[in-house]
Image (spheres, grey):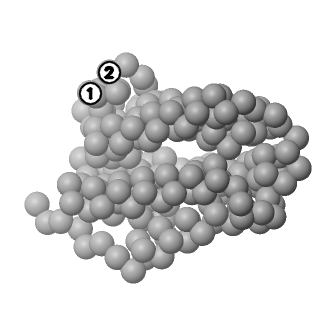
Amino acid sequence: MTLPRLNFAELIAKSVGMQVMFTLSLFLPARILAWPTGWVYVAISFVFGIGLTAWLARYDPELLAERLTGLRKADRKKWDKVFVPVIAVGFFVWLALMGLDAARFRWSDMPMWLQAIGFLLLLISYYVFYLTFRENPYLSPAVRIQKERGQTVVSTGPYRHVRHPMYAGFSLYVVGTALMLGSWLGVASGLLPDRGGGATRGSGGAHVAAGITGLR
């Protein structure tokens, strides 16, 4: 098997750019640098992002290449081209809202023990993400059937228990992040698009599953 060539310059640029977006989305609305939980969140996301990228580069470079280029593939679903940018914008608006709520105006009053639970949920969500990436070599960022890679249905690991473990993990991620940062607005506003996104992606997953049935 010929391993794909990875564009490391693009990979580094995207990783750094994403981390910068995370940080600015939180701290620009917050207008304060002395926000410990905000920096903890940024640090956790950075460590996990770098760690997962390094793991994929070593153990599944094909999946890493797909994650890097999947959104540019011609066979990507048309509705997905609209859905992904909308969700991306909504995600960073969500981070900004929590910066306003928890650090700048302090509308929410959340006890430390609940923030600690949020921290644990966030760590659990990242572990679920890792298990999902480990088990599913076809985990493209785009909704498409990867015929060129011989895509098959994955039913092992977390897929034995949950149809969409990535979405399940993201639900934990949303709640965990908002609780850890101390934002009730983050909890409420994060779960609404999470439920809608899960439903929309679930319908897309049904179309992909139907296509894969013909490949099995």
Quadrant in which residue 113 is drawn:
top right
Residue shown at 70% from the left, 55% from the top: 35
Q: In this view, does 171 lie above or below 16?
A: above
Residue 84 seen from this side: no
Residue shown at 46% from the left, 38% from the top: 123
Nearer the observer, 125 or 63:
125
Q: In which quarter of the image is the N terminus?
A: bottom left
User: Which residue is farthest bottom?
Assistant: 9
Question: Percent from the top left, x then y, of residue 74?
Answer: 47, 62
Q: What residue type is labelled 2?
A: Arg
Quadrant in which residue 110 is drawn:
top right
Q: Is residue 166 left or right of residue 200?
A: left
Question: Percent from the top left, x then y, of residue 83?
Answer: 65, 49
Q: In this view, does 189 lie to the left or right of 214?
A: right
Q: How many labels does the image show?
A: 2
Question: Percent from the top left, x then y, of residue 66?
Answer: 36, 59
Q: What residue type is labelled 1?
A: Thr
Nearer the observer, 121 or 111:
111
Nearer the observer, 77 or 22:
22
Disc 1 secondary structure class: loop
Q: Is residue 125 above or below residue 51?
A: above
Residue shown at 28% from the left, 56% from the top: 56
Q: In this view, does 8 lie above or below 65?
A: below
Residue highlighted by disc 2? 160
Q: Distance between the residues labelled 1 and 2?
A: 5 Å
Residue highlighted by disc 1? 156
Residue shown at 65% from the left, 28% from the top: 114
Disc 2 secondary structure class: helix
Q: In which quarter of the image is the C terminus?
A: top left
Mark 1 and 2 residues: CB-CB less than 8 Å, in contact? yes
